[in-house]
Amino acid sequence: MTASTHILMCPPHHYDVDYVINPWMEGNIHRSSRDRAETQWERLHKILKDHAVVDLVEPQKGVPDMVFTANAGLVLGDNVVLSRFYHPERQGEEPHFKKWFEDNGFTVYELPKDLPFEGAGDALLDREGRWLWAGYGFRSELDSHPYLAKWLDIEVISLQLVDSRFYHLDTCFCPLSNGYLLYYPPAFDFYSNRLIEMRVPPEKRIVVNDDDAGNFACNAVNVGDVVVMNQVSDDLSRRLTEAGFQVIQTPLSEFLKAGGAAKCLTLRTTEPVMPNVHAVDSVVSTTITLKGHLLDAGIINRALDLVVEGGGSFQVRNFNLGEQRQSTSTADVHISAPSNDMMEEILAQLIELGAVSLPDDQGDAQLEPVSQAGVAPDDFYVTTIYPTEIRINGEWIRVGKQRMDGAIAVKETPDGIVAECKILRDLETHEKVVVGVSGIRTVRKPESREKRGTQEFGFMSAGVSSERRVELVVEQVAWELRRIRDRGGKVVITAGPVVIHTGGAEHLSWLIREGYVQGLLGGNAIAVHDMEQSCLGTSLGVDMKRGVAVRGGHRHHLNVINTIRRHGSIAQAVEAGVVTHGVMYECVKNDVPFVLAGSIRDDGPLPDTEMDLIRAQERYAELVRGSDMILMLSTMLHSIGVGNMTPSGVKMVCVDINPAVVTKLSDRGSVESTGVVTDVGLFLSLLVKQLAQLTSPLVNA
Ligand SMILES: NC(=O)c1ccc[n+]([C@@H]2O[C@H](COP(=O)([O-])OP(=O)(O)OC[C@H]3O[C@@H](n4cnc5c(N)ncnc54)[C@H](O)[C@@H]3O)[C@@H](O)[C@H]2O)c1
Ligand SMILES: NC(=[NH2+])NCCC[C@H](N)C(=O)O
């Protein structure tokens, strides 16, 4: 027996599964045998009495989970932080545990009422006393960790739990003597696993597999070199033995029905304070304000999900719900994160959400000089598609040339400070770049109160649905194309050769001829196969009228490339009467600019194809700028490229036969984008028919 070790237990006289507050309890209400539970508890009690002094707290009626004394609180030295239970079902235990601690001479610290923390179930001391591992995510709040650090004067390492089966830290994590750790990595987020690996050397980490984790092997009581647990596989038992531990198994199946096992049934009340160990609290907090149709547009859900998925924790304060149909709501949200880096990552995503204003004390945007042309400073802010403003000298200024995946370059000019999005390769040494997340906000118009995706007739309600009638989307696109044309707006189309292969050339030619298209973006292939069809009636060597391959057809596209190369350009071949109809013909004849970006798989290429990729991107961006709408027709490569350089506010329609492509291209988080899964030739055919039916010019709205 280790005389200095005291353990608190509570006899299971009132234990039962009376409710469900964790996944293990589902289906087990009133299915635990009191007799078997008493027997199993007695066996554990007897085993532990051989190795420690076991104190008992009187069980109470109405609180069946009181048997799980691990959750009574967290003890260090003569101090104890009393638990604040998350679920009301267990809050009745608090006064009983508080009384026991006070009667036994502990100084009891109590957390604020609305700040849950479930004791040694969610906080476990390193067995060498060097720091406190503290879990959060299901029962305990991250905001409780600074209190633990302060009251117990110890470093707290916050670990986010991500699997609801392992809802308490002690169900998946067990610090052992001699610096060993028994744990189940999938129960933690990536960052927490990195923290564990940084603190516990590989040779001391005993990783538990799914089966052992499901049998609560990590929920073990360790006293000295003894490890007492519910059940363990031969392999894990061997590894523990090799590490110098004596493994004692004792069945606790009746308690597993409530989601607990050996460690849950115990609370070590003698935890020595180590000299020279002091509080280090890395938890950072801030308060943001969300504004918009927080409920209807789902903004608050998305924001809070972002916080949790980013490893943080939140408390919603001062929620003011908009009273009128179109009035907006506001909410102050207190956010905590285990480190500055994680907080910055969370805030960057909230800024992208666009409904966020950071506290005014966040100050100006941080600027760092570009020390090497084409290279941004570390921690540069990555731009999004949304209109963005940065705060310089207390003034908010709009960032120009908005696009995603760029940096914000800032420079002094005779007209004042100018900020614009730049892709990394274009950064110049006389510029500065925004780093971090302070002093940045995105400006997004509050989405309409209607939920996204429920507006079947609201054009561009985002979302992809192969079930959605193609005709419906065609009607909406036709209506928008007509409106844009009538007001002299700009529509750009990016298209792949599949448009030609599916018989779409005549329809796309019609759109260009009728003035619905002000720019065409594509690659070598769409031009090659369009002119192959125009000159030779085939596409990829297939007769477009009969649908059969023609003899020698496989050379047709090379013959066309060769002919165009001989004339020097597509325009010259059109002027020479070689190309007499088709998409490229209509572009030349109607002065519709086009850019053909080269790719690794190009034949030829055509003289017009821009094989300098950087130049091609620049020319694409020039043609995209100022667009009101972009149609992305069956080209994943070029559609992604165009999407990356298009700011929000531009209506985008993606047409592809592959739902995954449509989802990727439509999922921009902006309501202006939509996608339809269909054959592109069919889509164009229906679109032309619909436009032709819109005979009367629309009255300007
Ligand atoms: N001969 C050549 O020079 C040649 C030939 C082919 C491609 N290329 C080049 O390769 C690059 C990539 O070509 P890409 O954009 O065609 O390929 P891609 O794979 O990026 O996109 C093709 C898209 O078409 C979709 N699709 C296929 N059938 C469809 C249908 N019936 N209806 C609607 N969507 C359909 C696919 O799902 C895919 O997303 C381009 O730059 C192109 O010019 C050159
Ligand atoms: N330290 C623990 N894991 N305790 C287990 C507690 C079980 C209890 N039914 C609950 O859900 O709270």
Image (cartoon, rainbow, N blue to C red):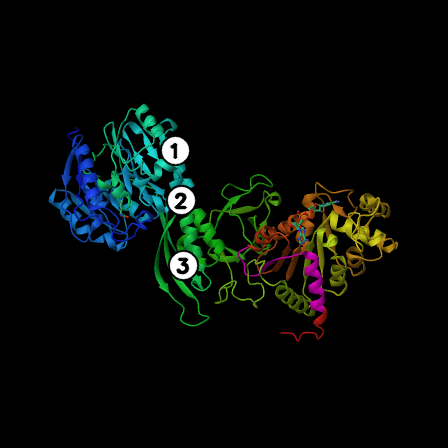
The C terminus is located in which quarter?
A: bottom right
Residue 115: image location, x then y, percent: 28, 52
Relative to residue 523, is residue 578 drawn left or right? right
Q: Which one is earlier in the sequence, the residue at label 1 or at label 2?
A: 1
**Secondary element at tag 3:** strand
Q: Nearer the viewer, mark 1 or mark 2?
A: 1
Q: CA distance from mark 1 to mark 2?
A: 17 Å
In the depicted view, which residue is nearer to us: 417 or 275?
A: 275
* 584 shown above or below 698: above
Q: Name the element at disc 1.
A: helix
Question: Residue 340 — which label?
Answer: 2
Q: Position of residue 476 (x, y in %)?
A: 62, 66
Residue numbers of the magenta segment: 668-691
Quarter of the image holding residue 458? bottom right
Q: Nearer the viewer, mark 1 or mark 3?
A: 1
Give the label on residue 198, or none: 1
* Mark 2: amino acid: Asn
Residue at x 21% of width, y 42% of height: 36
Q: Position of residue 497 (x, y in %)?
A: 72, 51
Residue 481 percent coordinates (x, y): 67, 66
Residue type, label 1: Met
| Residue 283 seen | no
Magenta-colored stretch includes residue 9 = no
* Label 2 secondary element: helix
Whether residue 685 appears in magenta in the rendering, the answer is yes
Kind of residue at disc 3: Thr
Do the CB atoms of the residues marked 1 and 3 lie less than 8 Å apart? no
For the residue pair 546 and 213, the one nearer the viewer reads as: 546
The residue tagged 3 is 289
